[in-house]
Amino acid sequence: MSHSMQKKGKASHQKTLSTIGQKDKYMLNLFSLKGEYGLNVVEAYRIGDTCLSQTVAHLSERYKIIFYRRNESIPTRFGGVTVFARYWLDQEQCKKAREILAANKVVISSVSR
């Protein structure tokens, strides 16, 4: 019985590694379309990503994409300022993201900036 459980685990692990997840598809598509404008945490939160730094780290590690970062100050509703990182892809990395999406048969559509 434990032998069959191991086979099941291996198969599911292989399946996970051979496919691209919906969130990965969405975020790669979004970053490739936004190009050098990119996203910061506030913008990502509005579209449902509650931990942009973790998403960027995951995409970087899994797909070997290089994200660029810069800090930007955003005013708070209380009159203060908060610093967030903005993440973006240069043209070469956008092309790489599109190639990954194309290899996984994802249709790239336009997005408003």
Image (tube, rainbow, N blue to C red):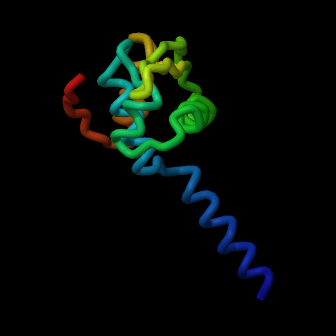
Residue at the extreme bottom of the image, as rendered? 1
**In the depicted structure, whether residue 68 falls above or below residue 53:** above
Residue 49: horizontal and vertical position, in percent? 44, 42
Residue 102, percent from left and from top: 34, 35
If the image is split into quadrants, where does the N terminus sit?
A: bottom right
- Left or right of 32? Residue 49 is right
Residue 56 rendering spot, x and y as whole percentages: 54, 31
**Nearer to me, 89 or 74:** 74
Residue found at the very far front of the displayed protein: 78
Q: Can the viewer see residue 97 in this picture?
A: no
Of 58 and 38, the residue lying toward us: 38
Residue 86 appears in the picture as rendered: yes
Q: Residue at x 72, y 81 (%)?
A: 4
Q: Residue at x 48, y 14 (%)?
A: 73
Position of the C terminus, as image quadrant, is top left
- Residue at 40% x, 35% y: name it: 44
Check the image and report above or below for 2 versus 36.
Answer: below
The answer to which of 81 and 56 lies nearer the viewer is 81
Residue 18 relative to residue 39: left or right: right
Task: Give the vertical position of 15 relative to 54 (above or below).
Answer: below
Q: Residue at x 58, y 51 (%)?
A: 17
- How many numbered tags mark residues here? 0
